[in-house]
Image (cartoon, grey):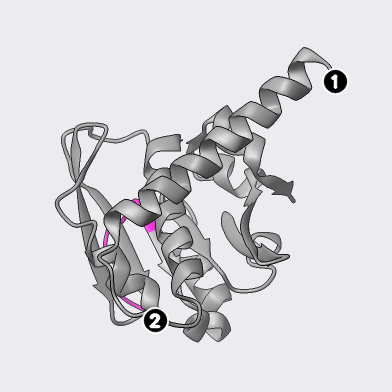
Amino acid sequence: MGKTAIRLTLARTAFVLLVICFASSIIQVRPAMAGDLETKVKVAYIYNFTKFIDWPDDDSEPISICVIGSDPIRTMLGELSNREVKGRPLRIMRVKDSNSIPSCHLLFISRSEESQIPSILQRLQGTRVLTVSDIPQFAKRGGMISFITERDRVKIEINQRTVRQAGLKVSAKLLEIARVVQ
């Protein structure tokens, strides 16, 4: 195994451990529910996306994470309010209507909004909003980051073309653990 392969394996392992450690530290202990661990891992990924994505905007503004639709992620993300990333506070907001999406850095689109994907993505064209979802084939359908589950493990797909078109930069560390799609 070459040095590059070893570094890649170490980077992936470190990122996964970071996600798992963060997921266990931000979520309060409560009765186990089906899918609860998966949701915690997705929340940890979303939190870490704010660390590994660069937005070309005012660094003094809070980082806004918006959630549209009904999803348990919204409740768990709420527990991140007032945490800081890169010296900036996090602000979690619920979007009630896909016709009036507020200014966000990251928009999580719940599965309940699957039929609205084309119109949501069209409204966001020309903005610097990172779109994330666990809707099947989301990244291939024009979204930016998609959660996929393989062998009971949450993984991510990144549509690098749509991320670049929005003027966002993805850290190489994040790209190392993702599946890049077009």
The residue drawn where x is 46% and y is 76% is: 110
- How would you rate the neighbour count of disc 2 (Cα within 10 Å): few for under 14, some for 14-19, many for 20 or more? some
Q: Which residue is mark 1?
A: 1
Residue 14 location (% of width, % of height): 54, 33
The residue drawn where x is 18% and y is 57% is: 81
Residue 150 location (% of width, % of height): 72, 64
Which residue, as the protein is rendered here, is positioned at the far top? Answer: 3
Specify start and end residues of the magenta stretch as a single range: 99-106
Q: Which of pointers 1 and 2 lies earlier in the amino acid sequence?
A: 1
Instruction: Determine if the magenta segment contains residue 101.
Output: yes
Q: Which residue is mark 2?
A: 69
Magenta segment, principal secondary structure?
loop
The one of 29 and 92 positioned closer to us in this rendering = 29
Q: Secondary structure at mark 1?
A: loop
Residue 171 location (% of width, % of height): 52, 31
Which label lies toward us, 1 or 2? 1
Q: In which quadrant is the N terminus drawn?
A: top right
The amino acid type of the residue labelled 1 equals: Met
